Amino acid sequence: MKNEWGDVRLGIDAFDLTGKRALVIGVGSPAGKAIALALAEAGADVAVSSTSTDGPAMMKAKSTARDVEKLGRRSMAVAADVTLGTGVQVMVRQVAKELDGIDILVNAPDLFLGKAADATTDIDWNRVMQVNLSGTFHGCRAAGREMLKQERGGRIINVCSVLGERAIANAAAYCAAQDGVLNLTRALATEWGPRGITVNAIAQGWMQHTALIGNPDPAENKTVRFVPMKRTGAADEIAPLAVYLASGAAAYISGQVMFVDGGLTTHL
C-alpha cells in the first residue's frame, strides 16, 4: 500500500524520518525541545525556532539546534515573534530555503495565564490569544503555504493543552485560546487533507513542566490527585507520539486531538 510519501512500511521502519525536513516552533518549552530531538533521532533534519525574539528564548533555540546537530542531523536556530504573522512567514521561508523545503511542522507555543475572568485585562486576554492561538495559526499558515507549493504533502502537529477540551476556573483566557487551537486543527485538516497534508493536535495534561503545578506528590497536590496514573507526565512522553504523527505510518490520521494526560480527561 502507498500514500503520498511512498510505501507504507511496517515495524520500526514505519517511523523512519530520514530525508524529511522539520521545523519546531517553541523549543523554549520542554515539550517543544523533546519533540525536536525525537524527530532528529528518527532521522529528520530539524530547524528550531523560539516564540519570541528576546535573548533567553533565542539562546534556548541555539542550544537545541546544537543538540540536534550532535545527533548527526542538519539544524538551524531561528527566532520569530509568533504574534506577528509577517515575521513568522519570513522565518518559515528562511527555513524552507536553508533545508530545501519543509515536510513537518510542530507548533508548541505555551503561554499560561492563571487569572480570574473579572481580573483579566484586555492586555492579558490579547497576549494569551496572540501567543497561543494566533501564533499557532501563523505557523500553520506559513508552513502550509510551503507544503502546498511543494505538492508532496506534509505533517502539521499542534501541541496544546487538555484545557482546550476541559475547562477549569481562573484560566478563562487560556482555556479559550486552547479550544481555538483544537478547532483550528480540525478546520485545517479538512481544508488541506485533499492536498496530502495531515493536521493533528497533541493535548498535554498535567506535566512536570506545567505552570504552577507545585509539588507533584498526589498526596500533597489536589491537582495531581485527579490524574488516574497519580503522577505528572514528562516531556519525553509526548515526543514519541509526535514522531508517529510525523511519520508515513500516520498518513490516514488527520483532524485528531490526542491526549497525553495519564487519563486526566476522564475526570476533568
Image: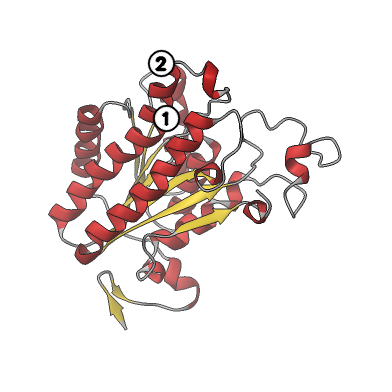
The quadrant holding residue 213 is top right
Left or right position of 120 against 88: right
Q: Which of 268 and 13 is in front in this view?
A: 268
Mark 2 Cα shell of 10 Å, populated few (<14), some (14-19), many (≥20): few
Residue 141 in sight in this render: yes
Q: Nearer the viewer, residue 127 or 62?
A: 127
Quarter of the picture holding the N terminus: bottom left
Amino acid bearing label 2: Ile
Q: Which of marks 1 and 2 is in front?
A: 2
User: Measured from the top left, where is residue 83 in percent x and y?
Assistant: 32, 27
What secondary structure is marked by label 2?
A: helix
Amino acid bearing label 1: Lys
User: Measured from the top left, where is residue 11 in percent x and y?
Assistant: 49, 76
Mark 1 Cα shell of 10 Å, populated few (<14), some (14-19), many (≥20): many
Name which of mark 1 and mark 2 comes first in the sequence: 1
Question: Which residue was labeled with disc 1?
Answer: 62
Distance from disc 1 to disc 2, alpha carbons, whole Å, reads: 30 Å
Left or right position of 191 against 65: left
User: Measured from the top left, where is residue 10 in percent x and y?
Assistant: 45, 79
The quadrant holding residue 194 is bottom left
Residue 123: numbered disc: 2
**Residue at point 34%, 34% (across, down):** 135
Task: Tell me if residue 180 comes above or below residue 257 in the rendering.
Answer: above
Task: Tell me if residue 96 comes above or below residue 249 in the rendering.
Answer: above
What secondary structure is marked by label 1?
A: helix
